[in-house]
Image (cartoon, rainbow, N blue to C red):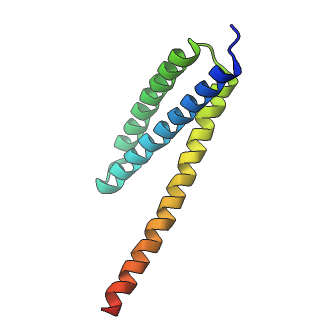
Amino acid sequence: MMLGIGKEASIFLYAVLTGVVTFSAYQILVLFRKLIPHHIAAVNAEDFLYWLGISAYIFRQMYQTTYGSIRWFFVLGVAVGNILAYFIKIFLKKTMSKWKKALEKRRQNR
């Protein structure tokens, strides 16, 4: 089945969003682990369940957008989405750190 370039572009953007969701879900899991310390067996079980869930989620997204066929642009889109989310995380961390320093400096000047 041949898809038009417009349809491929929209599927790619949908795949990027899927990549952002998968990265964000794992970051939430990491945050949960930092808030509540876990035994290594619990961490392994959480990771296993995460990968099962994410695999099902990606399969569902792929099935809905490309009717179950594996397309290179969908796989590339998921990878790009993960990388994009990583850089957004780094940017937000730096921005929050700068704001924190500015607030601390402002408090000291009072």
- The picture quadrant where one finds residue 99 is bottom left
10 up-or-down from 24: above or below: above
Position of residue 39 in the picture relative to residue 24 (left or right): left
Residue 9 lies left or right of residue 46; in this view the side is right
* Position in image of residue 37 (x %, y %): 31, 54
71 left or right of 103 in image = right
Question: What residue is shown at x 66% (from left), y 20% (from top)?
Answer: 71
- The image quadrant of residue 25 is top left
Q: Is residue 102 above or below residue 77?
A: below
Q: Residue at x 66, y 32 (%)?
A: 76
Residue at 37 percent of width and 79 percent of height: 103
**What is the residue that sits farthest to the bottom in this orientation?**
109
The answer to which of 54 and 77 lies nearer the viewer is: 77
| Up/down of 14 relative to 64, above or below | below
Give the quadrant of the N terminus.
top right
Place of residue 75 in the rendered image (x, y in percent of width and height, measured from the top left): 63, 28
> Among all residues in the image, which is located at the extreme top?
1
How many tags in the picture?
0
For residue 63, above or below residue 97: above
* Residue 64 screen position, x and y as percent: 50, 16
Viewport quadrant of the C terminus = bottom left
Q: Estimate the x, y position of residue 88 in percent, counting from the top left.
A: 53, 53
Q: Residue at x 42, y 28 (%)?
A: 53
